[in-house]
Amino acid sequence: MITLIFEAHSTTFDNEAELSSGHNDVDLSPLGLRQCVELRERYAGKKVDAVYTSDLQRAYKTGAIAFEGRHTPLFTDKRLRECDYGELTQQDAHMVKAQRLQRVDVPFPNGESYRQTSARMKAFLDELPARHKDGDVVMVIGHRATQYGLEHWILGKPLEEVVVAPWAWQPGWTYELKK
């Protein structure tokens, strides 16, 4: 069994402006940079065998800063990206949130659906057991869609339930991935 820890990327300028970034490659805000240091402190001395992040800078910078100076390998993977909101990229986050349930199977205009983001996560999760041994601890730093995929594929929750469930930040979510 592989222990998989999900951490949300640190706060960005879009988060502070309440905009939905999607595939917009927005940078971390000063608050986000402080949160990276807090993440580093939270995992200091704890076993983490590998860190995987999306290829968007808000995720990989979170990992790079948090694990700076450690010998933990850090990998970026495009499949861990946030949902592509298409024409709604960088639009009001509340408006995008209101559409989540209807976007489970129907893509955002010129974007993708949560079923598509979940398929990306499935492909990623299917590869992990070949890369890691039983007992490994793997961290995934990503986005809301990344976690939706974890909740769906590892915990077996329907996407229709996951995308509308209340979400609040916490210091990591732990999942068990069977080999």
Image: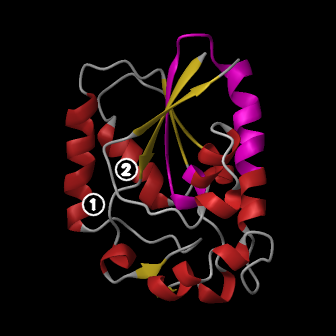
Residue 92 seen in the figure: no
Residue 34 in percent (x, y) is at 19, 54
Mark sitting earlier along the chain (1/2) = 1
Residue 126 seen in the figure: yes
- Quarter of the picture containing the N terminus is top right
Is 132 magenta? The answer is yes
Residue 56 in percent (x, y) is at 53, 60
Amino acid at circle 2: Thr
Element type at marker 2? helix
- Quarter of the picture containing the C terminus is top right
Q: Which residue is mark 1?
A: 32
Quarter where residue 76 is shown = top right
Q: Which residue is mark 2?
A: 62
Q: Residue at x 78, y 52 (%)?
A: 119
Q: Which residues are magenta?
A: 120-147
Q: Which mark is residue 48?
A: none
Residue 135 in percent (x, y) is at 53, 11
Instruction: Work out how far the residue at label 1 is from the one at label 2, CA to CA, in angstroms.
Output: 8 Å
Asked if the residue under mark 2 is in contact with the one under mark 1, i.e. CB atoms within 8 Å, the reply is yes
- 59 relative position to 130: left or right: left
Identify the residue at the far top of this view: 134
Q: Residue at x 59, y 63 (%)?
A: 82
